[in-house]
Image (tube, helix red, strand yellow):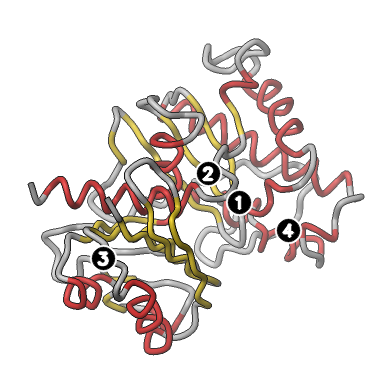
């Protein structure tokens, strides 16, 4: 079986052909430019590949309501050229095959629970901490969708008493994205995360906010595992700092968080940054199954 997979990010788009075992048979990269430049390149990649279905894990916010007239559209994104762009319809028209569509971070959690170290788990939260912050919630064995695009990355946080940074989110300021994203680190320290390797204060502050996020998600969803991905989590030792701070902030409250469980509860991605593209393939497989 050959399934097409698209992991659409704000900077780059990964296209791949994947089989039902999660083996990537072919892969390509496309820069995320304007829709008029980018969409034809996606279509060109898959032409002649004999794919049976296609899955798209897309940056957002996106419209996931299948009853909506704008289902499959990118909504009010920071990528201005893509606002109100219909991502889904051109792919359906071109290939005439089932197409699955969901958020990029939902694709990541789906990839991990299908092919990664969290395989078989029914309750997993995936956090990606990069330029922004996104979350995918897999609960009871299905992806969580609401009446509109869920935005757990904008949960409000309690500010660290020594932090006077206003926050980079123009809507909330002191939300997770506003205080803990890569954009927030640049705004606060005037340097990118990779340029702050020796700044202990910067990473202690980051661990404080990410641990608070872990506690909030634990109390809200009670998952079996929380996976922390994205560029910020590439910092050596950050996951250990977050674990230590999570234990301190939880202070014995949740039975899910303890010194005995933390290493299995709070983990990095296991699929070498392929979790998103593999999750997109799963979306395609699920769309094919829905068609009978």
Which residue is painted at 27% across and 60% down in the image?
54
Q: Tell me the CA gap for discs 4 and 3.
A: 44 Å
Going from the N terminus, do you reach mark 2 or mark 4 first?
Answer: 2
Going from the N terminus, do you reach mark 3 or mark 2 first?
Answer: 3
Label 4 vs label 1, nearer the camera = 1
Going from the N terminus, do you reach mark 4 or mark 1 first?
Answer: 4
Mark 1 touches mark 2? (CB < 8 Å): yes
Q: Which residue position holds label 4? A: 185
Q: Tell me the CA gap for discs 1 and 2.
A: 8 Å
Q: Which residue position holds label 2? A: 127
Label 4 vs label 3, nearer the camera = 3
Binning the other alpha carbons within 10 Å of mark 1 as few (below 14), some (14 to 19) or many (20 upward) gives: many
Which mark is drawn over residue 98? none
Q: Tell me the CA gap for discs 3 and 2.
A: 34 Å
Q: Which residue position holds label 3? A: 50
Compare residues 216 and 43 and report the one nearer the observer.
43
Which residue is painted at 59% across and 58% down in the image?
173
């Amino acid at each position: 079986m050959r399934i097409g997979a698209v992991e659409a990010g704000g900077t780059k788009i990964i296209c791949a052909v994947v089989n039902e075992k999660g083996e990537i048979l072919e892969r390509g990269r496309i820069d995320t430019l304007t829709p008029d430049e980018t969409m034809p390149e996606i279509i060109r990649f898959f032409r002649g590949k004999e794919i049976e279905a296609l899955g798209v894990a897309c940056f957002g916010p996106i419209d996931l309501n299948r009853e909506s007239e704008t289902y499959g559209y990118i909504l009010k994104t920071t990528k201005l050229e893509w606002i109100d762009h219909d991502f889904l319809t051109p792919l359906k028209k071109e290939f005439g095959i089932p197409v699955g569509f969901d958020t990029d971070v939902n694709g990541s959690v789906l990839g991990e629970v299908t092919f990664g170290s969290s395989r078989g788990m029914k309750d997993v939260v995936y956090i990606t901490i990069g330029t922004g912050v996104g979350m995918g919630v897999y609960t009871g064995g299905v992806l969580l969708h609401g009446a509109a695009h869920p935005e757990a990355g904008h949960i409000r946080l309690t500010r660290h008493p020594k932090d006077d940074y206003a926050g980079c989110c123009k809507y909330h300021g002191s939300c997770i994205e506003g205080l803990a994203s890569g954009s927030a680190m640049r705004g606060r320290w005037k340097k990118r995360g990779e340029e702050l390797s020796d700044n202990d204060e910067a990473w202690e502050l980051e661990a404080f906010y990410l641990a608070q996020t872990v506690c909030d998600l634990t109390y809200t969803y009670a998952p079996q595992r929380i996976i922390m991905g994205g560029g910020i989590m590439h910092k050596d030792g950050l996951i250990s700092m977050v674990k230590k701070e999570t234990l301190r902030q939880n202070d014995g409250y949740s039975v899910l968080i303890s010194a005995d469980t933390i290493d299995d509860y709070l983990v990095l991605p296991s699929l070498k940054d392929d979790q998103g593209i593999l999750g997109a393939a799963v979306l395609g497989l699920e769309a094919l199954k829905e068609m009978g």
